[in-house]
Image (cartoon, rainbow, N blue to C red):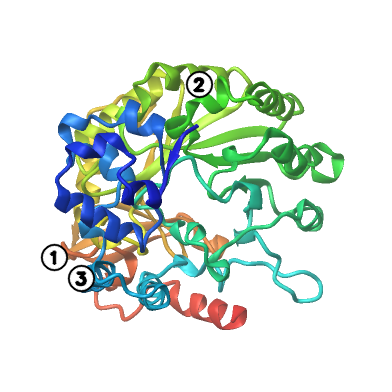
Amino acid sequence: MEVYTLRDLEQGRIKPLESVSPELRHAMRVVAHVLPFRVNRYVVEALIDWDKVPDDPIFQLVFPQPGMLSHEDFATVADLLVRDAPSGELQKQIQGIRRALNPHPAGQLALNVPHDDQGRPIAGLQHKYRETVLFFPSQGQTCHSYCTFCFRWAQFIGDKSLRMASREAHSLHEYLRTHHEVSDVLITGGDPMVMKARHLADYLEPLLAHDFDHVQTIRIGTKSLSFWPYRYLTDPDADDLLRLLERLAAAGKHVAIMAHYNHWQELETEVACRAIARLRATGALIRAQGPLIAHVNDDPSVWARLWQTQVALGIMPYYMFVERDTGARRYFEVPLARCWEIYRQAMQQVSGMGRTARGPSMSTAPGKVEIQGVAEIRGEKVFVLRFLQGRHPDWVQRPFFARYDPKATWLDQLQPAFGESRFFFEDEFEVMQQRDQ
């Protein structure tokens, strides 16, 4: 698999970019010094329609765009590069910009990391919701290509203080052994499917022991079905990977491949369809999720076609997310009111089989908040919201209301409706934050 990085971008080694204007190539170089850039040859040659660049959605998905930084930050980095500033000066400015981009949203490091019996944080583990534990295997903390909108961008910039990862399978297994409330384990990254099958087996096969009967579902978050379907076809250990999934499914575990899709173009290559079929044959279920993002899929017809194609291929539409409040959100975010309209109009175009996708959902610090709609109640226009998942189980499925704001793009920009001063969960959440700090 041939992969292109910032150095290839700077040295002009990505040949299709020769059709792009020099101004855009310069802008991409500037942004790629701040936010991570990596793309493989398959994405460049098989998924991007270069006749439609720069508007092609997959081009927007993987190549840095000038609007991803503020005008001030862009100008600062551009000036440093033009005058060939010393590396130390450049890195200092870049680090400052990155820190201001909310590298770990929703309290990922402050609130989600569990501790061992000695009160020490367990590296590479997150436990935000009672039933689900996230594990970040160190061998899976990269991707076949990087998405420009990615909320995990801080994993890929080389700053160890911002990175979540662990090589200790023992720490995962010990934690699960003593937490019987956990029914789901999500192996995440990065992308776990960049790992060798034998490394993935080291983490997952021990879960077949009776000690872990309470772990019913093994989820694997991945973009590989889009960005490198050959992982399931011709990679040297592709068969080993599929046999591992077969063993897990045959032993009674629910194996869920949490596939990240952003546009129907990702599903239309012959190799992608073959990879999906081969993966489904193992007994694993593929569930599809992804955010609604400007410049890529902020169109109901795109989502309708995406869900229809997924259903036709045997994939279950699972989540439509709202773009998170991190990284290049200024370029990709869509107002919540518009998110709801896109979701509603897309749902109108699909059958019941495609209406399994929940959303639009914000993965906020208190929990996953779904926008259920816009309504007028007692003369006040409001957003109707509910928790799909919450830090406190009692919050789940509980409806609440926010004043309608056509410009709001995240929960923290909304105000309670009907004259209330606070949302129902805020007092309890503040106590949780104080306890965990």
Question: Of label 2 and label 3, which has the lower sequence position?
Answer: 3
Which SS class for mark 2? Answer: helix
In the rendered image, residue 358, in percent from the top left (x then y), is placed at: 39, 43
Residue labelled with disc 3: 75
Q: Residue at x 33, y 71 (%)?
A: 412
Question: Of label 1 and label 2, which has the lower sequence position?
Answer: 2
Q: Is residue 232 left or right of residue 123?
A: left
Dot 2 amino acid type = Ala
Q: Residue at x 31, y 34 (%)?
A: 263
Residue labelled with disc 1: 379
In the rendered image, residue 26, in percent from the top left (x then y), is placed at: 22, 55
The answer to whether residue 229 is seen in the rendering is yes
Q: Work out whether 272 lies above or below 375.
A: above
Q: Work out whether 425 lies above or below 10.
A: below
* Label 2 with label 3: CB-CB less than 8 Å: no
Dot 3 amino acid type = Ala
Question: Of label 1 and label 3, which has the lower sequence position?
Answer: 3
What's the CA distance linking mark 1 and mark 2?
Answer: 52 Å
